[in-house]
Amino acid sequence: MNKHAISVSPLLIGLLLVVASPAHAVDWYVSPTGTLTSACTARSTPCSLASAAASAMAGDTLYLASGSYGQLFIAHTGTEAAPITVKADDCATPIIESAVSVDADQTAGVSSEVGEYLHFEGLIVRGWSTGFGNHWAGGTDSTEVSNGHWQIKNCISYSNGRTGFTFFSGPSYQLTNSIAAHNGSSTTHAWSSGVTMFEATGTNLVQGVISFENTDEQNHTDGSGFIVDEGSNGVTFLNNIAFGNSGSCFRLTKSSGTIFVNNTCYHNSQFGSQATGPTNPSELYFTNAGVTQQDVNFKNNVIVGTGMSPAGSQAIQNQPPSGWSNNAVSTGAATFFTAPDGANPDFTLASSASTLIGKGAAGTGVPTTDIGFDPKCLVKRAPKMFGLVTALSRWQYDIDTDYIAAKGGVDKCFNAGTRPATPDIGAYNNGPVKTYTATCMQGPGGTATTGGGAGAGGGAGAPGAGAPATGGGNAGGAGPTGGGASGVGTGGIPASTNAGASGVGASATGTGGAAGTGTAGGASGAAAGNLPPSTSGGGNDASGCGCRTASSPISGSRSVFALLGLVALGVVRRRRQQV
């Protein structure tokens, strides 16, 4: 009997894994034109965002295709072991956008009243009152605890009437590798900043975030890049950049234990004579100094104030007497950076920045990587606004969503580099920024780089309709640029030229792409400046941004475990009968 028990134990392990897995581990595919309300397990049968968000349960993942959507409201809650995840599909740039005024009811583009353990990745949110926001829990000094444990990564929240990212009265928020810009121009509902922590508890982290040209046009008091507000104790900020904000780069009120390491602040305090509370927001402002100076750790930061009266005449207000080390502080023109006021604002360290390079403090709490932000994701031009949100005349920069979409999503803006043992000061490690060189496109058979190829949609256009390619997979379809069918590529022959001429539905002019080997097929030709065919082919993640199929490896493993579990149950029953 013991021998029988030992022989079936691997199958019993499978059964246990099935039992331990979430009850609602479902992949939902969503598109702006999706109409289904269930069974959206493939790109060819997508749901609407509203139906998927209303139905998603703990452990579920929503994959959003490119395009414009309405409000994202999560109705249920995840768990620590099984969060609800909403993310951009491979190579996609989904946009949660308001086309009407929402200022009166202060609607958030991405929100939930009850949802905890929610993960958001790769979303662009614009035109709302607030970009991302959880439940408002009763105001200042409220004892009510709101819904927390949110993780937001590779997201953009801009052109919102109030705040970009807001976290109210809940525990454990993480915001990483994201952008907040042009928020707060509402004159009726403000108290706004790029990123706001308000009575946030637990473990909170803001890392690798660009926050620029935010304001508070109702009160002319907040409008900071980042604010730790009203009892948000122990929040950590690493590798962030704030520039051109109306208020401070970073402001603290009634909060202690703040960690602020390897950040870059540049020419904030743009309110000028409009500033009302305080009238001198400066780059860093420690309001309620006796509280906000307690147990802080500020090191390896570069802080460059405008030096202009009255708002920016001094770079730091109420500097703490302890917990302050290896920070570089100056006002006016600075030679620390490559091109902070350039066509693409570049805060990488200039070769002449000898007071920053290798001058940081090492040790616990210092990030091992830098921000790695690609400056080309921002561009110097009058910003385009959305909804009924208005721009300020002093705003100089815009988010280049076309560039970001062509690269394959917001995550391609962040390519962290490793810091040396003796770190540099500021958000960037010294040296050039790694950039994502391949242009990632999605077709029904997989992904491919620009130039077409099986599974490619062609250029920046929609996925191709596709006809079978000789080498396997689906041919690229009618994208507006670089489209056309794939070449004949048999058995994985590398492409020698672009597999797809420009123009709609044009035939391939090259020798064809490498044949895809993934479940859905997909091959790729190598366009100039993109990854070679050996690393850019389609199919199952062959390109580093490969498209998932309806039967993803995770879903497949669940099926295998389920089958093993059933077999184990049957074997145990039979052997019990024999014994």
Image (tube, helix red, strand yellow):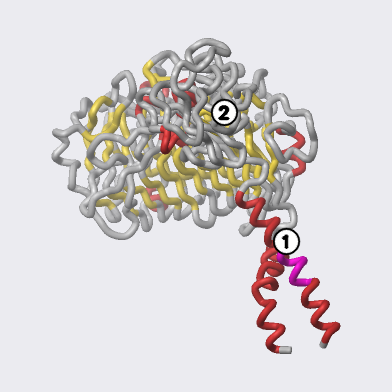
Relative to the observer, which residue lies in front, 161 or 456? 456
Rendering coords of residue 411 (x, y %): 46, 36
Q: Which residue carries the number 1 mark?
A: 562
| Disc 2: CA contacts within 10 A as few (<14), some (14-19) or many (>=20) | some
Span of residues in magenta? 562-569
Left or right for 250, reference 74: left
Amino acid type for the residue under numbered disc 2:
Thr
Q: Is residue 164 visible?
A: no
Relative to the observer, which residue lies in front, 454 or 418? 454
In the rendered image, the quadrant that contains the N terminus is bottom right
Compared with 87, 379 (above or below) is above
Compared with 218, 154 (above or below) is below
Q: Which residue carries the number 2 mark?
A: 470
State which quadrant residue 372 falls in: top left
Compared with 87, 183 (above or below) is above
**What residue is drawn where x is 47% and y is 22%?**
499
**What residue is drawn where x is 55% and y is 36%?**
90
